[in-house]
Every structure is written in C-alpha cells, then in structure tokens.
Image (cartoon, grey):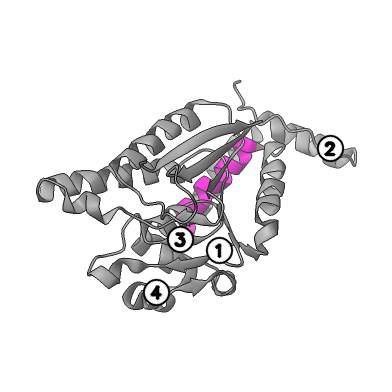
Amino acid sequence: MQTEFKLRRWGRIALLTVDNGEDFTKPTTLNLAAWDSLGAALDELESGDWAGLLLTGKPFVFCAGADIGMFEAAEGPEDALRITRRGHEELARLRALPFPTVAAINGVAAGAGLNIALHCDIVLAARSARFIQSFAKIGLVPDAGGTWVLPRLIGMARARGLALLAEPLSAERAEQWGLIWRCVDDNALIYEARRICEHFSIAPTQGLALIKRALDASAGNTLDAQLDLERDLQAVAREIPDYAEGVRAFMEKRKPKFSGRRGND
C-alpha cells in the first residue's frame, strides 16, 4: 500500500498521520501519491477553522524518507524534477500554515522524513527515536529544506557534520543541540503532544500566526527591518478581539477565554 497523509479532526486540532497501511516493521517512504495526499490535506488545513496541527507517524515509525524506487522509475530527469518540485511546494505550504504545528517523532526519521518534521513549529521526539540525514550515503543532496533548516536550528558546523557524515543522531542529543524542542520517554510522547495541542486549542490563534510570521522573517531581515515588521504586526495584533480579551483577563486576574477569531470575523 502506498504511503499517505491521513487527516483527522480532534476539536480544533488537526491530526495528520504518515501511514502506509502496513505493520510497523515496514518502512514508511514518501512517493508522489504521498505528496498528493499531503496536498489534499493542506487544502483542508488552509481553508478550515483550525487552532493547530499534530503531525506524527504510526506507532514506532515516523518516516524513512523518499521512495528511491520512485526516482529510479522516473521517465528522465524532467520527471524526477517534477516529483521533487511537488514535494517542495507542499512543504512550503506546511510551513506557512497560519496556526502552530507540532511534530511528534515516534521512531526513525530519515532524509526528507526528518526534514518534514523540522518544518513544524515545535518538534517532540520519543527517547528511542533516531534522526539521520541519509542523503550522503547514496550520493544525494539533502532536500525537503534540509540545507535551509539545519544551519538555522543547530549552526553550520553541526549541520555540515550531519549532512556530510550521515551519522544517526539520538533524540536526546537532538534536544541538547536545539534541533528539537523536547525529548520525552516513549510512553509519554503522545501525552506531551496532546498537552501542547490542548494549549493551542484555547490560545489566541491569530496572534500566534503573527508570531510565526515574525520569526520566519527574522533570518533574512536586518535589525531595522525586523523592528519595522514587529511594529506592523503588533498593530495588526491589537485589532484582533483576543488582544482585548487578554488585557481584560489580565486586569481581572482570571484566565482569558480566547476565540481565535480574526478582527473582521
């Protein structure tokens, strides 16, 4: 069975699972059908009322990366490029979602499978999880944004080591390096992921979307440009009803009741 991204709703949280329908001993790899299913899921995520996304894999599995056979079967270089472009388009959409995204890595995450998770805002991993930038083992270049996200998360020296040596990295070391937000015991992973998603389900969704925009822009901005962007986004945030509710709750010494609505909803 081909790998697909299965989307389910959990209140205002979307649960997106990488699944190939096989038992957990079979690797979950990405092919063109997987990218198509991710695109269909993103269509729903971009148009619906969501407060957050939880991306995970089947028990004991996350994603082993791209299906090499897919590229071997491609009808020439242009066909292979088309497949790569398809995946990259969907990853750009995933990163740009206007609400927080959480990845819960519950097994081996290799190649593009790892890089997909690293495009999420918060990445959790089970203690038994292992990460590997496996491209160099077959003479390829890290894709799915790996060469962009790795230096920004862990610095160039460590990014070069992971990419050039293709050595596995433990979840504990990944947390120490700042590659992920947190490493937790295997049996606590789903509970920690749900706790974070429950937090986002009652958070000021539109304000969090503005925070994401500011952080994503910071790497390419000068300080002056970033200060200007913060000023402009802050002005937008003040027009969102959740800001007024947050201020009232602070003054009244109570927990805020955010709606997540835009200012003109």
In terms of depth relative to the viewer, which is nearer, 238 or 212? Answer: 212
On the question of residue 221 being in view, the answer is no
The answer to whether 223 appears left or right of 160 in the picture is right
Q: Is mark 2 on a helix, strand or loop?
A: helix
Image mark for residue 180: 1
Q: Does the magenta stretch include residue 105?
A: no
- Near mark 2 (Cα within 10 A), the count class, few <14, some 14-19 or many ≥20, is some
- The reply to whether callout 3 and callout 1 are in contact (CB within 8 Å) is no
Who is closer to the viewer here, 62 or 160? 62
Mark 4 and mark 3: Cα distance apart in space: 13 Å
Q: Where does label 3 land, which residue?
A: 109
The residue lying furthest to the right in this view is 253
* Figure quadrant of residue 32: top left
Q: Which of 109 and 94 is in front in this view?
A: 109
What number is the disc on residue 162?
4
Q: Please tell me which residue is depicted at 52% across the width and 38% down the height of the picture.
A: 98
| Three-letter code, disc 3 | Ala
* Residue 214 on the magenta segment: yes
Magenta span: helix, strand or loop, mainly?
Answer: helix
User: Residue 199 at x, y = what percent?
Assistant: 71, 44
Q: Would you place residue 245 above or below residue 131 in this image?
A: above
Q: In this view, does 71 lie to the left or right of 33?
A: left
Of badges 3 and 2, nearer the viewer stands 3
247 up-or-down from 77: above or below: above
